[in-house]
Image (spheres, helix red, strand yellow):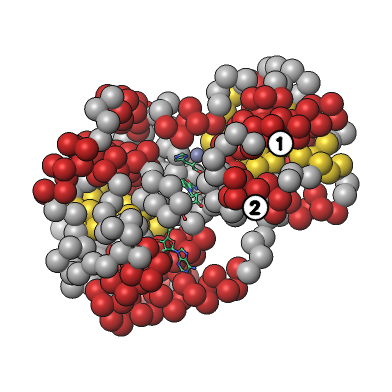
């Protein structure tokens, strides 16, 4: 069960600088899978799908068919569809605000500088599905891609042992504008998207969350394709003061611990009384929750309640940890927001339970983990776009500033560069 630590104890450092045990073993397995898929394509994809997901598929059944999409709409609980559609619309409204426009700055002498913004052509979105299914992640990946204007949105997700994709994820995909769905998960799915196989054509970008195998695979194929970030096993860090309700704090910690045995849930609080009350609440709530094995492992191995000397020290710890999700369960969350430097998403106050963001509010739930919120942003519309610079120099402008460029080129010893400007300046001088 979860430990209570005091700031200053060496274990606190270990919790804050999270390193997975057995990382080298995971890396070895993942690089083997990538190599096999690169060399043997579909054959390796199907073998790994049989081994890890117990699904026997063929190249013909790897892709979700139109009939399977129709069937998914028939079998889902009809009450869920409007909630899914409302979540999709909230996500779309939020991400539309991120859309960047092309711009052109014409100047008086005829020079124009500008920037073109273009969507990527073909992207791969990873939707997890090992120990739970994630229709919400379908929306979080596909909606910003759609808002960006991507034409080919290729979804991959692990199949069930019966060789099927969860029907809610299929419906979410159809509602969000996904164009192809393949029944493959794990590192083998990332490899297929990165290298291409006979059945799955390669993509320009792979986005989406996943377990340690998926996340390491994305890291290893980076360069072959672009990736969004490292969005691995879930994390939550809660900063709480004495105003926090231990029932809510415990519930929110558990909401992320249930994702994975490698997930982590950390509470930092200056209130020793709250720390003990939250520990007791966690024990009470675990007793009625269903994913006990996962909860027990993640609370034991990657989680802790840390009692600090002050709220300022708690904030410092949060910035060091750089959590995927940061909850400010304090009386005046906006008063301390200015001190927060590193987090994927910040949840403000006692009523912004983390699952509000997971499912519904609109901001993306695909977020950086493992300390990478120090330099990565949430998945967003920009991830699916690229920019091109536009430079249109007029004759007048080149004539006026050309010598500057010649000087800079000569400093670098690149006289062909200097020459490309000089030949123009020479002709202009003769006119
Ligand atoms: N950071 C984020 O934004 C975010 C968002 C949602 C979910 N998540 C995380 O996504 C993950 C979902 O994990 P999951 O496992 O349920 O689904 P998953 O789809 O990520 O992983 C399942 C796949 O893992 C592979 N796998 C399992 N055991 C393996 C082994 N021994 N060797 C090689 N490959 C193996 C299999 O191919 C299987 O298909 C969780 O860690 C969750 O916390 C993160
Ligand atoms: N909390 C996850 C990101 O770490 C996202 C999610 C999807 N469904 C439930 N939760
Ligand atoms: Zn979650």
Does any portion of residue 419 appear in the rendered image? Answer: no
Q: Which residue is the site of mark 1?
A: 283
**In the image, is residue 78 above or below residue 187?**
above
At 65% from the left and 52% from the top, the residue drawn is 297
Q: Quadrant of residue 205?
A: bottom left
At 24% from the left and 74% from the top, the residue drawn is 42
Disc 1 secondary structure class: helix
Answer left or right for 419 relative to 180: right
**In the image, is residue 107 above or below residue 247?**
below
For the C terminus, the image quarter is bottom left
Choose between 166 and 208: the one closer to the eye: 166
**In the image, is residue 139 above or below residue 46?**
above
Q: Quadrant of residue 256?
A: top right
Choose between 388 and 341: the one closer to the eye: 341
Q: x and y percent of residue 206 in the render?
A: 35, 57
**In the image, is residue 414 above or below residue 203?**
below
Q: Residue furthest bottom?
A: 39
At 39% from the left and 74% from the top, the residue drawn is 34
Q: Which residue is the site of mark 2?
A: 297
At 74% from the left and 18% from the top, the residue drawn is 243
Choose between 152 and 351: the one closer to the eye: 351
Answer left or right for 146 relative to 344: left
Answer left or right for 319 relative to 170: right
């Amino acid at each position: 069960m979860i430990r209570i630590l005091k700031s200053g104890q060496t274990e606190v450092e270990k919790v804050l600088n999270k390193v997975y045990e057995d990382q080298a073993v995971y890396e070895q397995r993942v690089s083997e899978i990538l190599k096999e898929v690169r060399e043997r394509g579909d054959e390796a994809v199907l073998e790994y799908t049989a081994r890890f997901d117990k699904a026997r598929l063929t190249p013909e059944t790897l892709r979700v068919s139109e009939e399977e999409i129709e069937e998914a709409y028939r079998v889902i609980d009809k009450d869920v569809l409007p909630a899914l559609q409302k979540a999709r619309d909230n996500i779309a409204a939020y991400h539309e605000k991120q859309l960047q426009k092309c711009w052109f700055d014409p100047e008086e002498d005829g020079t124009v500088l500008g920037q073109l913004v273009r969507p990527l052509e073909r992207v791969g979105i990873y939707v997890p599905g090992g120990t739970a299914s994630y229709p919400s992640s379908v929306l979080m990946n596909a909606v910003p891609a759609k808002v960006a204007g991507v034409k080919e949105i290729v979804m991959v997700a692990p199949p069930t042992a019966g060789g099927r994709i969860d029907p809610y994820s299929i419906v979410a995909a159809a509602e969000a504008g996904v164009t192809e769905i393949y029944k493959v998960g794990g590192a083998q799915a990332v490899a297929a998207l990165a290298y291409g196989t006979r059945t799955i054509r390669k993509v320009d970008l792979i986005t989406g969350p996943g377990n340690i195998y998926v996340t390491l695979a994305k890291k290893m194929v980076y360069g072959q394709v672009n990736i969004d970030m490292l969005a691995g096993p879930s994390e939550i860090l809660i900063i709480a003061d004495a105003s926090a309700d231990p029932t809510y704090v415990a519930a929110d910690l558990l909401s992320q611990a249930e994702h994975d045995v490698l997930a982590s849930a950390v509470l930092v609080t200056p209130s020793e009384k709250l720390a003990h009350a939250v520990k007791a609440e966690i024990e009470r709530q675990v007793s009625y929750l269903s994913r006990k094995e996962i909860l027990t492992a993640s609370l034991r191995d990657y989680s802790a309640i840390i009692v600090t000397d002050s709220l300022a020290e708690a904030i410092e710890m949060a910035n060091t940890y750089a959590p995927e999700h940061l909850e400010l369960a304090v009386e005046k969350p906006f008063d301390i927001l200015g001190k927060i430097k590193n987090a994927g998403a910040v949840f403000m106050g006692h009523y912004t339970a983390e699952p509000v963001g997971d499912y519904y509010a609109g901001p993306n739930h695909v977020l950086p983990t493992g300390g990478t919120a120090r330099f990565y942003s949430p998945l967003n519309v920009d991830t699916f776009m690229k920019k091109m610079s536009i430079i249109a120099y007029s004759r007048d402008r080149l004539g006026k500033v050309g010598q500057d460029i010649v000087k800079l080129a000569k400093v670098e010893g690149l006289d062909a560069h200097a020459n490309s400007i000089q030949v123009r300046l020479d002709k202009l001088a003769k006119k």
